[in-house]
Image: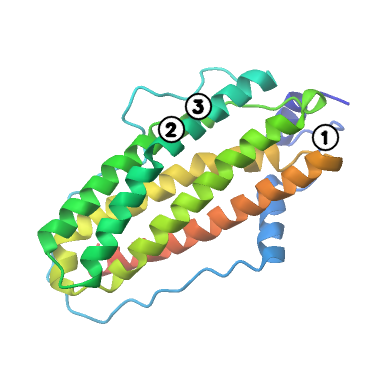
Amino acid sequence: MKFFTAALAAFAVGSTMAVPVDTRSASDIVADQVDKAGVEVPKVDVPKVDVPKVDVPKVNVAAPTGAVQAAAAPVTNNVAVVIVVKQVYTTVASVEDTVKHDLEVIKGLVAGTIDVQALLKAITTLKGDLQTLLDSVPLLHGLLLEVDDLVDDDLEAVLDLVARVETLLAEVQKVLKPLGALKAEILAVVGAELREVLSLVLSIANPVVTFVLTVVAPLHLEGTLAGLLAKITNSVVHIIGTTAAVSNLLGVVLALLHL
């Protein structure tokens, strides 16, 4: 069996050489899993309100701001790959409680009479904590798994990371969804920060989903490895569903802000 690095390279350039991967694209593989899983993306209706046009600074949040950068060259040793995956996992775990606290604050503010400035502050705090994740996930770029040397522990590390990201982003989406129905005058104040938070969620999810689509999903595995692969694929299907819902909510916010 060929090393999976060769298989992935052939997959990326559309080579016709024989490699042990599914002949479909990785995105088609996961799309098929989405269909099978019956993922339903919630639809959010845009309230028909007149919102005063506001000047919202166009801030790009898709790029990491910290010192963490993607690997300059592919990391193909499975032991080294797992070390990187666990490093990203540690970052997710380290900010998870803080992010959940931010979300609890936002839920409490939205549940009662809304203090607009307090809500703005809470959303801004959440943005800062999510930025920590965005600074970490680029490490997943350039990781390749050697299929011949793959063991359960390797995929379990990947599953731990993907499942944790899945749960955290789903919670963020769930808490922020009601903000799309805020009164126009409130959204005019918090809308810019909310837009950036939603964009951050999409930017965090992208490297995780890409890693699974291009490195993990195309693997041909058997036994317990196949079972772990199925769990990883299932988690990424749910992440895709969450990002679709976040994109929908982002569209609502942009529409209400006349952007």
Badge 3 marks a residue whose secondary structure is: helix
Q: Nearer the viewer, residue 237 or 56?
A: 237
Tag 3 near tag 1, CB within 8 Å: no
The x, y position of residue 199, in whole percent, is: 35, 50
Q: In the figure, 202 relative to 155: above or below?
A: below
Disc 2 vs disc 1: which is toward the camera? 2
The x, y position of residue 221, in whole percent, is: 83, 39
Find disc 3 in the rendering and name its residue.
87
3 or 1: tag closer to the N-terminus: 1
Tag 3 near tag 2, CB within 8 Å: yes
Q: CA distance from mark 2 to mark 1?
A: 39 Å
Q: CA distance from mark 3 to mark 1?
A: 36 Å
Left or right, 73 with respect to 198, comes to: right
Query: Residue 133 falls in which quadrant of the image?
Result: top left
Instruction: Count neighbours of disc 1 (C-alpha within 10 A) and say few if under 14, some if 14 to 19, many if 20 or more.
Output: few
2 or 1: tag closer to the N-terminus: 1
Q: What kind of residue is marked 2?
A: Thr
- Residue 91 marker: 2
Q: What kind of residue is marked 1?
A: Thr
Residue 138 seen anywhere in this rendered image of the structure: yes
Which of the image's four quarters has the C terminus? Answer: bottom left
For the point 72% across and 51% down, which residue is it? 29
Q: Nearer the viewer, residue 89 or 81?
A: 89
Q: What kind of residue is marked 3?
A: Gln
For the point 13% across and 67% down, which residue is it? 53
Instruction: Count neighbours of disc 2 (C-alpha within 10 A) and say few if under 14, some if 14 to 19, many if 20 or more.
Output: some
Disc 3 vs disc 1: which is toward the camera? 3
Q: In the figure, 13 relative to 212: above or below?
A: above
The x, y position of residue 167, in whole percent, is: 50, 52
Find disc 1 in the rendering and name its residue.
16
Q: CA distance from mark 3 to mark 2?
A: 6 Å
